[in-house]
């Protein structure tokens, strides 16, 4: 790397490289490694690796300029020659373009950003990225689903990954979390079983990215530690509106360690500043077909449009001697610590404001590990976390094919690396030190070992003393699998309880095995007899007798999604249905669009065909891609005799409107016949979240009511409850 400057100087004389490339101020990467780059709108560190093809000759991989893109043949109609190194190199590179996709979390999207600490937190941790108010640290975040393969749809029902890397000035710190604060199993040795049960059937490879099959529910019902996470996934948490509208959680209990060596337990959470929001199931299913990239696109568009999403880093900190004082074990990853018991402390905020330049180089090759920790952070003895510390390193070796994956630009720490690790496939460093061992005298003892007091060396919390007989067992303090799923259920509003039950009904009604269905009912019954009854009635099976051992009426805060209004409606999408048949309607629609855009809404005008101002046609429009729909009538949209759309394709605008209504979205109308038209498609104008103004004077009132409706996000009184 140190010779790169010389290389660039030489390259400038060859004409193969642009003057700009040669004059790159980052020609000395060693110096760069010392420079912390905290401005995430540009990334000087990554920029040195960017290949700019805006000029220069096409070359082979070894740099020689090459000519025609035809293979070398024995005569124009003859066979291709083995000699053709240009052909062989190109095809060989193509043949090796893929690395193994992630065994889980294969489908995802990532973005760069910056974390800013709210204060100097050295009173709770020695972590340097938290040691000053306003201190900035670059981050990269990757969101994902778990079960689907790399090309699967975004809006399948699943737990969602929320992995963040802090490129701190003392090395990389990763929190490899999910959008659900608990996990299915308590011991990492069961992870392959969980994933084998959830993934598609080994014979047919069906179904893709779904748990609605026998093996998944066989596992869930035989392994009741899964129930709590399962409940979160079956509720709105499994189908978020976007990556931007979900929280993230580190799941495990970790330790914060101070410079004096003392430590406390800590749980990490990322609280979305966009507000939590979820889709409804039918909408999510439609989206999987209409736009498999819905979440990826949403994140990309928000950042490109200058609306970077943000999350606050909040922690629950508590004394280590409290480990067993909450009625469960804090080392058990299937448990939340209710916020009433340990409130959140907000440490800082991160904002994602830059999309990757190259998906493969950045998002696909980012290799997170729970074992990437920095001074001031330490692990706990949570047996799931302990196993993960092995698995992620191992999986990265498999994906990269060697131990040098930390040298990939997206993985490289933004601080100098000095150690005695050497060689291996794809070694990118040119080590000068001829004495790569410690201790040595011939290299004056370098690289020198840091200690806790000199060089700010990493250290393990003083409190960690472990002793005991060797046992293959789990502590009995991990035994209660039913109280917390019930706490979760109790904390939902009725419509969310219904959604959860509907989701369980949907998935279990696809099961073939009656035995598995009965086992599911037995487990549900341990949580709540009411849930068991409501599911059993749909499956046509007998309800088990109530078993009240774990029944209770406790509730906790922060669980409900639909019971909140969004703190911001910026970037939400509004569709205006209109017609180009009358200039009047189009003019009104354009005016309305302008008004709504003032609040940062993304507004599309939908009409029967493209014309000036029309963004989408009826044939391509769908209620799934809008958070609210407004009909602007003019005098052309609704046929006054039939009050249905006379436009191509027949009935489409009515369907968009009705779907938006059915899925609980705010809907509005401007025009004389709108009320009649709404009724004709089955949208009652008397319901909450339906706003109709008869003439254009009502436009201001429509806009302000509609904006409130968007903040409400979903009008849950439209979702039917069991009678
Ligand atoms: Fe895992 C990937 C989150 C338990 C083994 N996991 C992976 C990713 C996330 C999580 C977000 C994707 C990271 C990215 O975007 O690249 N995993 C979790 C959480 C868990 C959890 C929150 C429980 C609290 N995982 C877990 C266990 C094991 C693994 C118990 C194995 C013993 N996870 C993996 C893996 C993956 C992975 C196979 C696949 C790709 C990768 O690591 O980088 O090693």
Image (cartoon, helix red, strand yellow):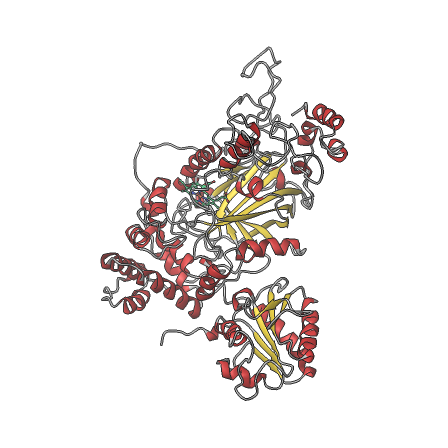
- Residue 461 position within the rendered picture, expressed as x and y whole percent measured from the top left: 50, 34
- Horizontal arrangement in the rendering, residue 433 relative to residue 336 (left or right): right
Point out residue 226 in the picture as x, y percentages from the top left corner.
35, 52
Q: Is residue 615 visible?
A: yes
The residue shown at (52%, 43%) is 175
| Quarter of the image that includes the N terminus | top right
Figure quarter occupied by ligand 1 = top left
Picture residue at 31% right of the left edge, 32% below the top:
470
Q: Is residue 258 visible?
A: no
Q: Position of residue 277 (x, y in %)?
A: 52, 62
Instruction: Give the image quarter of residue 214.
Output: bottom left
- Which residue is at the front of the view, 166 or 208? 208
Foreground of the two, 306 or 383: 306
Q: Nearer the viewer, residue 440 or 154?
A: 154
Q: Is residue 566 left or right of residue 389?
A: right
Rendering coords of residue 434 (x, y %): 59, 14
């Amino acid at each position: 790397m140190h010779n790169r400057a010389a290389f660039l100087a030489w390259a400038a004389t060859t004409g193969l490289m642009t003057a700009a490339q040669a004059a790159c101020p980052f020609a000395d990467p060693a110096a760069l490694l010392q420079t912390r780059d905290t401005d995430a709108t540009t990334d000087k560190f990554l920029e040195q690796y960017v290949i700019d093809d805006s000029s220069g000759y096409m070359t082979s991989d070894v740099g020689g300029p090459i000519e025609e893109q035809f293979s070398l043949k024995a005569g124009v109609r003859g066979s291709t020659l083995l000699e053709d190194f240009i052909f062989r190199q190109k095809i060989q590179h193509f043949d090796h373009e893929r690395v193994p996709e992630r065994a889980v979390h294969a489908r995802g999207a990532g973005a760069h950003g910056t974390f800013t600490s709210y204060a100097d937190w050295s009173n709770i941790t020695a972590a340097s990225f938290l040691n000053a108010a306003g201190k900035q640290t670059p981050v990269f975040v990757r969101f994902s689903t778990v079960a689907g393969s790399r090309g699967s749809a975004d809006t399948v029902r699943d737990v969602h990954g929320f992995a963040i890397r802090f490129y701190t000035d003392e090395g990389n710190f990763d929190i490899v979390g999910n959008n659900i604060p608990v996990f299915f199993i308590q011991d990492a040795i069961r992870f392959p079983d969980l994933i084998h049960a959830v993934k598609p059937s080994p014979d047919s490879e069906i179904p893709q990215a779904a748990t609605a099959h026998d093996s998944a529910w066989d596992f869930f019902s035989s392994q009741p530690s899964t129930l709590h996470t399962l409940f979160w996934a079956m509720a709105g948490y499994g189908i978020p509106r976007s990556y931007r509208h979900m929280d993230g959680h580190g799941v495990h209990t970790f330790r914060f360690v101070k410079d004096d060596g003392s430590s406390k337990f800590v749980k990490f959470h990322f609280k979305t500043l966009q507000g939590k929001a979820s889709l409804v199931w039918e909408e999510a299913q439609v989206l999987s077909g209409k736009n498999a990239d819905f979440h990826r696109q949403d994140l990309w568009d928000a950042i490109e449009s200058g609306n970077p999403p943000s999350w606050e880093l909040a922690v629950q900190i508590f004394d280590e001697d409290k480990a067993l004082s909450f009625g469960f074990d804090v080392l058990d990853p299937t448990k939340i610590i209710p916020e009433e018991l340990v409130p959140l402390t907000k440490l800082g905020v991160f904002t994602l404001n830059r999309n990757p330049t190259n998906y493969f180089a950045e998002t696909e090759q980012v290799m997170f590990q729970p074992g990437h920790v920095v001074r001031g952070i330490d692990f706990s003895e949570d047996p799931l976390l302990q196993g993960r510390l092995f698995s992620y390193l191992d999986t990265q070796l498999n994906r990269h094919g060697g131990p040098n994956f930390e040298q990939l630009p997206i993985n490289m720490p933004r601080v100098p690396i000095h150690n005695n690790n050497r060689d291996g496939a794809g070694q990118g460093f040119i080590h000068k030190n001829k004495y790569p061992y410690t201790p040595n005298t011939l290299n004056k003892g370098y690289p020198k070992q840091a200690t806790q007091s000199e060089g700010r060396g990493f250290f393990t919390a003083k409190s960690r003393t472990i002793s005991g007989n060797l046992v293959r067992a789990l502590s009995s303090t991990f035994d209660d699998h039913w109280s917390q799923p019930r706490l979760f259920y109790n904390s939902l509003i009725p419509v969310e309880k219904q959604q959860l039950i509907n989701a369980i009904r949907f998935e279990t009604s696809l099961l073939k095995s009656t035995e598995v269905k009965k086992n599911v009912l037995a487990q549900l019954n341990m949580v709540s007899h009411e849930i068991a009854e409501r599911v059993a009635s749909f499956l046509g099976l007998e309800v088990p007798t109530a078993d009240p051992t774990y029944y209770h009426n406790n509730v906790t805060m922060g669980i409900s999604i639909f019971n909140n209004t969004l703190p911001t409606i910026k970037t939400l999408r509004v569709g205006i249905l209109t017609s180009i048949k009358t200039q009047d309607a189009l003019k009104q629609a354009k005016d309305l669009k302008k008004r709504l855009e003032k609040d940062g809404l993304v507004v599309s005008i939908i009409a029967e065909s493209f014309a000036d101002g029309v963004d989408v046609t009826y044939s391509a429009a769908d209620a799934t891609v809008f958070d609210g729909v407004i009909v602007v009538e003019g005098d052309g949209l609704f046929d006054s005799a039939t009050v249905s759309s006379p436009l191509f394709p027949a009935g489409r605008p009515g369907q968009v409107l009705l779907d938006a209504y059915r899925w609980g979205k705010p809907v509005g109308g401007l025009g004389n016949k709108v009320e009649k038209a709404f009724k004709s498609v089955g949208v009652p104008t008397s319901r909450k979240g339906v706003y109709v103004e008869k003439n254009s004077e009502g436009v201001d009132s429509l806009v302000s009511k509609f904006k409130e409706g968007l903040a409400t996000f979903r009008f849950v009184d439209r979702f039917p409850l069991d009678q």
